[in-house]
Amino acid sequence: MGPPTPTEADMLAIVAAIVFALALLFDLADISSDAINNSTLTVLGLLLIALHLGGVGTGASASWRPRRRGRR
């Protein structure tokens, strides 16, 4: 048995961690532009965490269909 491999559900959490790391580096280096700044990356990271916690990317079907009862 080898180390566990990341699944699709874990990928959003990994991407969020990378985005937060970039936000920290940008903040420490005082790097900023008009389109992307520290708060933009922080909000993007929070969005990715929320999607991960919401189950996006888990492969589960999002469509809900009620079951039909058969007539007897």
Image (cartoon, grey):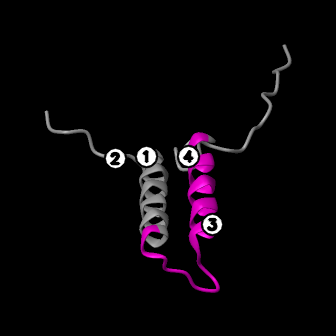
Q: Which residue lies furthest to the right in this view?
A: 71
* Tag 1 near tag 2, CB within 8 Å: yes
The residue tagged 3 is: 39
Q: Is mark 2 on a helix, strand or loop?
A: loop
The residue tagged 4 is: 52
> In which image quadrant can residue 5 be found?
top left
Q: Nearer the viewer, residue 52 or 42?
A: 42
Gap in angstroms between the C-alphas marked 3 and 1 = 24 Å
Gap in angstroms between the C-alphas marked 3 and 4 = 20 Å
Residue 3 lies left or right of residue 58; in this view the side is left
Residue 44 lies left or right of residue 11; in this view the side is right
Residue type indicated by callout 3: Ser
Marked residue nearer the N-terminal end (3 or 1): 1
Give the residue at x 61% y 49%: 51
Is 5 situated above or below 32? above
Q: Is mark 1 on a helix, strand or loop?
A: helix
Give the residue at x 49% y 80%: 31
